[in-house]
Image (cartoon, rainbow, N blue to C red):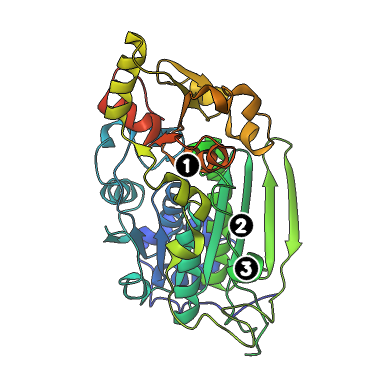
Amino acid sequence: MSFPALVEPADELTIDEVRRYSRHLIIPDVGMIGQKRLKNAKVLVIGAGGLGSPALLYLAAAGVGTLGIAEFDEVDESNLQRQIIHTQSDIGKSKAVSAKESIAEANPYVTVVLHEERLDNDNVLQVFEGYDLIVDGTDNFATRYMVNDAAYFLKIPYVWGSIYRFDGQASVFWPHATDEHGESVDAPCYRCLYPEPPPPGMVPSCAEGGVLGVLCAQIGSIQVNEAIKLLAGIGDPAVGKLVIYDALELEWRKLKVRKDPNCALCGEHATVTGLIDYDAFCGAISEEAADAAAGSTISVTQLEHMLKERDEGTRDFVLVDVREPNEREINQIPGSVLIPKGDFLNGTALAQLPPVDTGTQVVMHCKSGVRSAETLAIVKGAGYADAVHVGGGVVAWVNQIDPSQPTY
C-alpha cells in the first residue's frame, strides 16, 4: 500500500547537491521531487549506537536535511565492534558529538540537532515535537514503549528496529496513517504487536547476550530504507508488517501485523491515555527478585573481605557465577564456581549447591546484578535463607577491585 509523502519538497537543490545526489535523481521513483522532500525532512534518531550508527550515516548520505540525535551516553571501546559512526579516537567522547562530527564528514549539507539527555516522561514529547519521523534504535523495553506512546500522542510515524545475537526485526508503526485518499488504514502500534513486555530477566540485553556487529548495519539499513519511502512517498512501506531476519541461517520472513482493537493505546477502549511509569511497567527485575535482594545484597568490597576470610579459614561460603561459560572466559571473580542461570531455571542447579543442612552460605553474582537477583529468589525459595548476591556483579569487581581484567 502506498502512502502520501510525509514531507513537502524543498524549493530547490543547489548545483553541489544535484551532483551529490545524482544517483538518486536518476531513479524515476525518487527523482528531483523525492530528493527535495528528503532535503526538507526532519528525522529524529533515538540512540547513536548499534542501530543508530548506520541509520544516521545512511540518512545523512541520502540527503535528509535535518537529523536529530537523542543520545546521552559516551563512546566505550566495546561499542566499536558494531557502532560504526564512532572510531578509536572517540572513546570517552559524547556519542552525540561523535556522531555529529562523523555526519559532518559524510555530508556537510545536513543540519544536526543534538538532544544530549536521557529521554523520559518529562522531555520526550518536547524532544519529539517538530520532527516528521522517528527512527528508534533503543535497546530496552521501557524506552521502546515510551517512544511508541509519545509518537502516538504526537501522531508521528516511527520506524522500529530490534537486534539480538543473530536475530533482527523491523517494522513501521503509524496508527494514524491514511492512504492516498485520506482514508484510515487501521495501522498498528508497537503495543499491538507486543501488548506486554516480557517477564523481567527473561530476555537478556545485548550487553548480556551479545550481538553480531554486522547485524546492526543490516537492520539499520532496513530502517533507513523505510524512512526514505515514508518521507518521499514511494514504494510500499512496512506499515502493518514485521520483517524478521535470521543472520545465521540467512533467512528473511515478512509477517502481517494487524491493529489490535483491544490495544491499550490505540484500541477502541484505550486505557493508556498519557505517558505512564515505563520502568515500573517493564520492570528491571521481577518482584520476587526484588524481594529476595532486599537486605541480601552485598558490595564487591564486602565480597573481597569475605574471600580473604574464606582463604584464612574463618568463613565458609560458595561463590556462584550464574553467567554463561563464554562470559566467564572474558573475566571472573577468583574463587567462584560456574552454574549458569538456566540451570537454576530448570531445577538442576540446586543439586550442585552444598546441602541446606550444612549451613554453607551461598553467594551469587552475574555481570551486573540482575541475573543473580533472579537466581537468588530461587535459592532462597529452596531454603538457603542467608543467601546473598553481589550488587554490580563482575562489572563492579573489575572497576573497583581488579582493573587488570577486561570488561564487556
List the residue tagged with mark 1: 373
SS for callout 3: loop
> Relative to the observer, which residue lies in front, 356 or 375?
356
Amino acid carrying mark 3 in the image: Pro
Residue 156's disc is none
Q: Residue at x 60, y 65 (%)?
A: 196
Depicted 104 relative to depicted 3: above or below? above
User: Mark 3 or mark 2: which is in front?
Assistant: 3
Q: Which mark is residue 195?
A: 3
Question: Is residue 141 something one can see in this rendering?
Answer: yes
Specify whether 75 is left or right of 198: left
- The residue shown at (64%, 74%) is 188
Q: Which element carries disc 1, helix, strand or loop?
A: helix
Residue denoted by label 2: 170
Q: Residues within 10 Å of mark 2 (few under 14, many from 20)?
A: many
Is there CB contact under 8 Å for labels 2 and 1? no
Marked residue nearer the N-terminal end (3 or 2): 2
Q: Is residue 47 above or below residue 261?
A: above
Looking at the image, which residue is at 48% across and 23% down? 360
Q: CA distance from mark 3 to mark 2?
A: 17 Å
Who's the residue at 45% across and 51% down the image? Answer: 290
Q: Amino acid at mark 2?
A: Ala
Mark 2 or mark 1, whichever is nearer to me:
1
Taking the view exactly as shown, the residue that stands out farthest to the top is: 312
